[in-house]
Amino acid sequence: MNSAYANLREKGQSIKAAKHVSRRRQRWPIDLNADPYEIPLEEINVANPELFKHNAFAPYFARLRNEAPVHYCKDSQYGPYWSITRYRDIMEVEKAHHIFSSAYELGGVLIQGSTQSVSETPMFIQMDPPDHDVQRKAVAPRFTQRSLSELEGLIRQRAGRILDELPRGETFDWVSLVAVELTGQMLASLFGLPVEERRRLIRWSNIFSNADNPELVASSGDYYEALAACGDYFQEVWADRANRPPTGDLVSMLAHGAQTRNMGPKEFLGNVVLLLVGGNDTTRNSISGGVLALHENPAEYEKLRRHPGLIRSMVPEIIRWQTPLTHMRRSALRDLVFKGQHIRKGDAVVLWYISGNRDNSAIDQADEFIIDRHRPRQHLSFGFGIHRCLGNRLAELQLRVIWEEIMARHLRIEVVGPPERANSALFRAINQLPVRIAAQP
């Protein structure tokens, strides 16, 4: 079968042959020992991935929230951009999609996006109404409360089996044996694929979500070759689903949807990439982030052990605390003044969810991890408005079930070494987390 994605593969091979490394893949200089309050305000670049790799971002965003909540960075590895750092300002921009666009034609929703790169894989999150609404609606039934209730038994079965097979009394990596394993298995199920395919899906998801991480993707050529391989694979899945009655998986929904069955190969691939990454990173990093948060806040862990019923409020608090997706980007559709700052048509406007989730003016004790928080769902980790994360309920469900199964087995997860964090300004990801479960007598 002729590949609709041969051009992507050829582009990847060409880039690798030229040994090209884009500006955004190069390390950007930063002094991690510097005091953020002594750096000239106009020189602050909160999009530097090194800040997230070393978990050093918090004081930079705190300063911007206090002194320059709408802040312009004139030079970064991603080019110039505006930062929106306060909770209520982020919500205001999210609601004004008629002014602040998500369209891929303008650069899409990520700070590293360019009109050239995102046009190769357009996806509904990088569209404005009405196209966004039509395509989102096609797969939305897979994430309804009723559909997720049907999945809960399968999630619980898999979570229990994963936990029961973990070593006792010895160090292992929580990320690979638990977080990746559970989300990978569920990702395969959402696409209607055999569970054995999970590692292939995870590998692609890792490449796509770390496209700006020089430590994990050797060159942009790897990225384009992975796009081509993923496209070829799912092109066959699409053909299979289109020739069969609807099965309820995500590809079948797209293949049979009245408004999506005729989408072109680039658009189809873009939506597959979106669903792959969206179904993997948020849940996976929250599963690991929760273990780390409880380790760093032992009083909260003891509170949970005494009152396991707090899991339901702890889950959204973990997601707020971790903020797996640090930001979304919008593009200004016209010149305007926002909170006293003159934003020009075409400017990149970055909504820093990770900063809004630490905004004490909107969230009480925002710098504290509190598992019995009064309003735990008051956070921005899933975005807001028309682009609010479609799989938010599934993420919460998987996180709730894994912790219910942990507590039912009376397991105490002990973190025994520092986490390895991703070198990414987009995903607040944990790549490795060494832990130990005490052997039970």
Image (cartoon, rainbow, N blue to C red):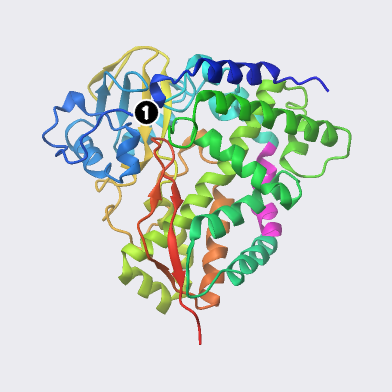
Position of residue 224 relative to residue 244, above or below, is above
Majority SS type along the magenta span: helix
Furthest residue in direction bottom, as rendered: 441
Question: Which of these two is toward me, 80 or 433?
Answer: 433
- In the image, residue 242 lies at what x, y percent? 84, 32
> Quarter-wise, where is residue 141 in the image?
top right
Residue 127 in view in this figure: no
The quarter of the picture where the N terminus appears is top right
Name the residue rendered at 55%, 30% in the picture: 125
> Quarter-wise, where is residue 229 in the image?
top right
Name the residue rendered at 39%, 50% in the picture: 420
Find disc 1 in the rendering and name its residue.
Answer: 350
- In the image, residue 31 lies at what x, y percent? 20, 35
Taking the image as shown, residue 311 lies to the left or right of residue 91, namely right
Name the residue rendered at 36%, 16% in the picture: 347
- In the image, residue 183 lies at what x, y percent? 60, 52
> Which span is picked out in magenta?
139-151
